[in-house]
Amino acid sequence: MMKRDLSLQRTRECCIRGQIIFTAVFTQQPTDLVVVAGQPVTLPCSIPGYHGMVLWLRDGMALGVNRDLSGYPRYDIVGDHSKGEYHLLIQRTEMQDDAFFECQAIQAAIRTRPARLTVLVPPEDPVIMGAPVVSLRAGDPLNLTCHADNAKPAASIIWIRNGQVLNGAMYSKTLLRDGRRESTVSTLYLSASNIETGQRITCRASNKAAPNGKDAVVTIDIQHLPLVNLSVEPQPILEGNLVKFHCSAKANPPVIHYRWAKGGSIIREVSGDTYEVIVDHSFFTEPVSCEVTNALGSTNISRNVDVYFGPKMAAEPQSLQVDQGSDAIFNCAWTGNPSLTIVWMKRGSGVVLSNENILTLKAVRQEDAGKYVCRAVVPRVGAGEKEVSLTVNGPPTISSTQTQQVLYGEKGQIKCFIRSTPPPDRIAWSWKETVLESGTSGRYTVETVSTEEGVISTLTMSNIVPADFQTIYNCTAWNSFGSDTEIIRLKEQGTSTPFSLRLAVIIGVAVGAFLALIVLMGTLGAFCCARFQRSKCILKPILSGTVKVFNRHPWFHNQMVLFLHVQSLVP
């Protein structure tokens, strides 16, 4: 008995004195259904053996009790009452039937699960704006608009021509006030070259309620503007000679009037089908046009004249400033007739870089900077040229003499010449453990001057001392692209021998001469002592005194120390 109770869903048991007298069970329940509006549908509900009240609800609202649905003439309760069948029959479904339905057994206090009834509505017959015939002028594009209204779900629209579906249409959907149905609008655009007169184009609207679709058809009628031909005689012709333009037209309806123009400017003194004029080079680039008008509109046709003339600049090249490693592209456009030849060269070089309007320099380097010439030549007619500049942004480059001359004991200057595009952000001099960018530090001063060629940074020393000739000076410049450094040494002006080396030689010669004198006196003393008796050797005390003098006299001692110090400075 317990297993049976667990298998029953939505049941209710009524018990008296512990005995089961009745169990209500739904043997049939409504399920989710989809139906097309206007079609009948039956929602099942069966409770065998139940004789109480049965109630149907739509979106939670009661429809009626048992089989009495008098307030809803399209609704009926059908089925065998003795079998507990209370099926809900909807004879012709409408949009209001798109709702949740459930069946309730009141005394048993049970209900079915809510069942969703979805009502589909086919679209109304589609309508093409302007149908059945759409007229347009030759050369105009075609815009067709088709709408299919009051559909659920929204209608899908396709366009068909000669059995082929046309792509590229634009769609939009609008939800109606009932919040359920939608209207669809489709717009088809066809270019003038993609349409012909007499073509039939179909708009087909469909949805799940109308899978085969509903059609609307339109016929295309193209009306022709004047057909025009413009002739020019004679051609080719030299600049400064007479030419004749003739504008012939076939039109339906007939031609109303002619209008002439050159380069877009109307020629008011001419009104017929012929125009005569002396031509210059502008007729080669500015076409002459003839516009012919009838009741439907106008047709305009234009022609250039084959005028012979020398080079005329059409697009002037511009000077460039580019980053190092980037491409530099110059554009130099000339017009000329007959065909001209274009030559790109760098000023000062005979190398042809290009014979095209565009000169492209790949991954430019700083040495590519300079003047470039675009030259055009029309054989046997004339020539012309235009010069432009190329500036290359890159790290600074320093070009200075690595050995610069100064006078010992005088004020000295070291100059550092810097070329930099963009200009240097910072310039610094450094030597030993000192760094100076500007101003004065001790006996050193830094000044920077900008010129047309670049920047000159000068390091001034108020008094040149011997140590300056042994110092290495670094001039360094920075900009946003990098840096460059130049090492500069000092040399005494007027001599090719460094000052420290000459000083070392002088001191060395003096000390060497003194030492040679000592050796000579020692040799003589030894010779005398060997030849004569030791008691008679008078040079012995002389030698002893000389050595004492050398060891004790400050001048000799200082010269030897200075000599050793200078020797240590010589590279």
Image: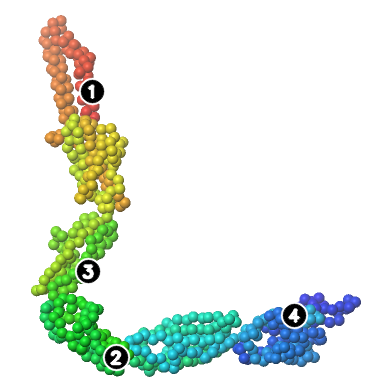
- Decide: marks 1, 3 in contact (CB < 8 A)? no
Q: Nearer the viewer, residue 16 or 76?
A: 76
Q: Which residue is mark 4?
A: 111
Q: Which is in the foreground here, disc 3 or disc 2?
A: 2
Instruction: State which quarter of the image contains the N terminus.
Output: bottom right
Q: Determine the CA span between mark 1 and mark 3.
A: 79 Å
Q: Give the Cα distance between marks 4 and 2.
A: 79 Å
Residue positioned most to the right: 17
Q: Is residue 57 above or below residue 373?
A: below
Viewer-side label of 4, 2: 2
State the mark number for residue 561: 1
In front: label 3 or label 4: 3
Query: Which residue, given by chain and number where applicable, does mark 3 sit on?
Result: 315
User: Tag 3: residue type?
Assistant: Ala
Q: Earlier in the sequence, mark 1 or mark 2?
A: 2
Q: Amino acid at mark 4?
A: Arg
Residue in the picture at 34% in, 92% down: 223
Q: Residues within 10 Å of mark 1 (few under 14, many from 20)?
A: few
Question: Residue 549 appears at what percent x and percent y?
Answer: 20, 13
- Distance between the alpha carbons at the discs numbered 3 and 4: 87 Å
Q: Which amino acid, mark 2?
A: Asn
Residue count near mark 2 (Cα–Cα under 10 Å), binned few <14, some 14–19, many ≥20: some
